[in-house]
Amino acid sequence: QVQLVQSGSELKKPGASVKVSCKASGYTFSSHAMNWVRQAPGQGLEWMGWISTKTGNPTYAQGLTGRFVFSLDNTINTAYLQISSLKAEDTAVYYCARESGWAGDYWGQGTLVTVSS
Amino acid sequence: QSALTQPRSVSGSPGQSVTISCTGTSSDVGGYNYVSWYQHHPGKAPKLMISDVSKRPSGVPDRFSGSRSGNTASLTISGLQAEDEADYYCCSYAGSYTYVFGTGTEVTVL
């Protein structure tokens, strides 16, 4: 069965970096793009962008700064979200979601990233 | 890209129907047949309920239905059940391989 398993919660200080992983199983990894979505405390879902698992080419949402980088390791069917120079406002639950057609049909369980001094 | 507009909350009694609206523009909701809806229980992963405006994925009860008129999409839950109490988000393709979510609607079963 299709599964997306994300890495565990992270507590980071402002200015640090974090790398969230999303390991896929149960399907051919390169057949579906991967989206990233976040939810800040008390806020709604926000689409961050996606990465082609065929080419590795990322597309970022307008306004998402260069501090956010999507990457892949196709040898282990894993997508990554790296955030550098962390700020308090980056505190959120980050989700990966498999693209199917024009929707996210399977989602990871979410990774809470807390940025606090 | 501005978030799509949804009502903050809707409520209904068990067995009733509720409809959630999702208003965008001709550059997103009204311009493409790629509106999806997600059910989100706090602390859990969002679940796809409707794709491509009105397609129901396998396993989603048929009391969930989607539609669109102009720049406004809608999700209707018929025969409301206690387990339907959750947050619901619409999402639309917005061109240039980008997407935008709605502001989210809290559904309460009275």
Image (cartoon, coloured by chain):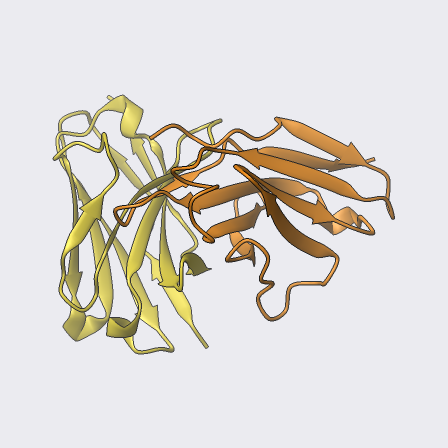
> Is B108 left, or right, of A11 in this rendering?
right
Residue A87, position as x, y percentages in the image: 22, 24
Asked if residue A73 is positioned above or below residue A108 in the image, the reply reads below
> Looking at this view, is A45 or B19 the one in front?
B19
Q: What residue is shown at x 23% (from left), y 29% (from top)? A: A63
Total count of labels: 0
Q: Is residue B7 above or below residue A58?
A: above
| Residue B62 as seen in the image, left or right of residue A22 | right
Which chain does orange denote in the image? Answer: B
Residue A116 in view (yes/no): no
Residue at 70% x, 63% y is B61
Q: Nearer the viewer, residue B13 or B73?
A: B73
Q: Quadrant of residue A69?
A: top left
> Who is closer to the viewer here, B43 or B32?
B32
Q: Quadrant of the N terminus of chain B?
A: top left
Judge left or right: residue B73 versus residue B91. right
Q: Based on the displayed image, in which of its 4 quarters is residue B49 positioned?
A: bottom right
**Image coords of residue A57 (percent x, y):** 14, 57
Residue at horizontal 36%, vertical 61%? A99
| Vertical side of A20 occupied by A2: above or below | below
Quarter-of-image position of residue A4: bottom left
Colour-to-chain, yellow: A
The residue lying toward the viewer, choosing from A113 and A51, is: A51
Q: Is residue A116 above or below residue B106?
A: above
Q: Could you tell me residue A17's position as x and y percent?
A: 14, 37
Give x and y (percent) for residue A106. Answer: 44, 62
Asked whether residue A13 is in view, the answer is yes
Could you tell me which quadrant the C terminus of chain B lies in? top right
Q: Is residue A19 left or right of residue B66?
A: left
